[in-house]
Image (tube, grey):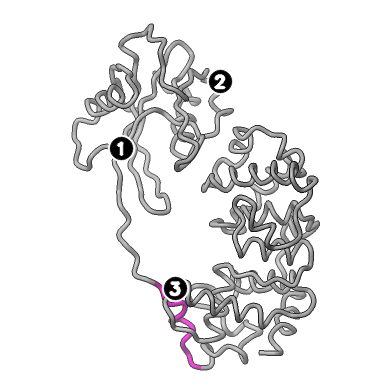
Amino acid sequence: MQQLPGKLLGWYDANARSLPWRSDPTPYKVWVSEIMLQQTQVETAIPYFQRFMGRFPDLASLAEAQESEVLQNWEGLGYYSRARNLHKAARIMVSNHSGQIPADVSTLKSLSGIGAYTAGAIASIAFGAPEPALDANIRRIYLRLLDLHEPPGSKTDARLWEFAKEILPDSRTGDYNQALMDLGSAVCTPTNPHCQLCPLQIECLAFQRGTQTELPVREPKAKVPHRLVVAAVIKRGNKILLARRPADGMLGNLWEYPGGSLPEGTTDLPGALQALLEERFGLWIAVGAQVGVFKHAYTHFRITLHAFTCQLTDADQLSLPADFSWVSIDSLSAYPMGKVARLISRKIDTGLEL
């Protein structure tokens, strides 16, 4: 294993991916990219990173922005708590750290949205600190190198962190960690790894024993629940009624069309939507034509959403629930939304009859 870092760095020098945050790896760019790469593949993150940098080129501009604008520039990338944590951490760094990204792991981990892996990646890549990193790609490589057939869990992770510290080179730790990320993405892939291209064949116990496709050991996938959802597109003049989701929940502070989940098997969707809005929000509506049916999969469940055009039966209703707002159709694009709500908005933008 002593030869492993040198072999890996040699491979990286010849095969490193050209990525926008690597061309000028400032601490700010490294931090933003690492947050984006949580739960997101590199190819997907690149255009979002470039757009985000165009609007928030430095820590100060991000800290000064309103959360709604940060969410709007994050829209489409998903896992919106990352954007809220990024914004919160930026403000903390401006107020408590002289507007600088901290260089040490312990301080980094005290900031919103930064765990052990992200702290190690930022410290090593941005500051050259001798810190290991352990993301899904690196974890998979180490499991195969050691031929570990242990189920995922804290015991396995502790062993992998210990190995990561032991094998860390004395220099170029940032390049070493990025080399592992690239190797896991291009060569030591989750299925059908390209072992013939790997520079670590000699060191890899799983390759020597022919067990590489058995690793990592995975827990059986649970059945993904399904939710039946309805939503109301309520129009008054040239405005649409939007509701903002609670800040501390899923899709926090994003805007959507008022509605909610129904019991599976509900057949009278218009009637159920009418009753739901009356009970949940105190809105009395008449339900019209269907706008569309939208399907989407989240991490732990999937939904089928039925959206309907609606009108308030009391057209002069002035008392609205908190976090509701009448928004002009021309302004819908300025309100940050989740994917399904945005699809409904685009349908409205194309001239949907309401």
Which one is in front, 6 or 165? 165
Residue that numbered label 2 is attached to? 330
Say few, some or many: other residues with alpha carbon within 10 Å of mark 3 (under 14 / 14 to 19 / 20 or more).
few
Whole-angstrom CA distance, mark 2 to mark 3, is 49 Å
Indicate the position of residue 223 as horizontal and vertical percent values: 30, 59
Q: Are the two marked residues, 2 and 3, in contact with CB atoms closer than 8 angstroms? A: no
Q: Earlier along the polypeptide chain: callout 2 or callout 3?
A: 3
Marks 2, 3: nearer the viewer: 3
Marks 3, 1: nearer the viewer: 3
Stretch of the chain drawn in magenta = 209-218
Residue that numbered label 1 is attached to? 261
**Quadrant occupied by the C terminus:** top left
Q: Main secondary structure of the magenta part?
A: loop
Q: Residue at x 74, y 53 (%)?
A: 29
Q: Residue at x 62, y 56 (%)?
A: 114
Please identify the quarter of the rendering in which residue 117 is found.
Answer: bottom right
- Indicate whether 261 appears above or below 85: above
Please identify the quarter of the rendering in which residue 292 is found.
Answer: top left
Q: Earlier along the polypeptide chain: callout 3 or callout 1?
A: 3
Indicate the position of residue 123 as horizontal and vertical percent values: 73, 63
- Could you tell me which secondary element the residue under label 1 belongs to? strand
- Indicate whether 91 appears above or below 147: above
Residue that numbered label 3 is attached to? 152
Q: Is residue 199 left or right of residue 135?
A: right
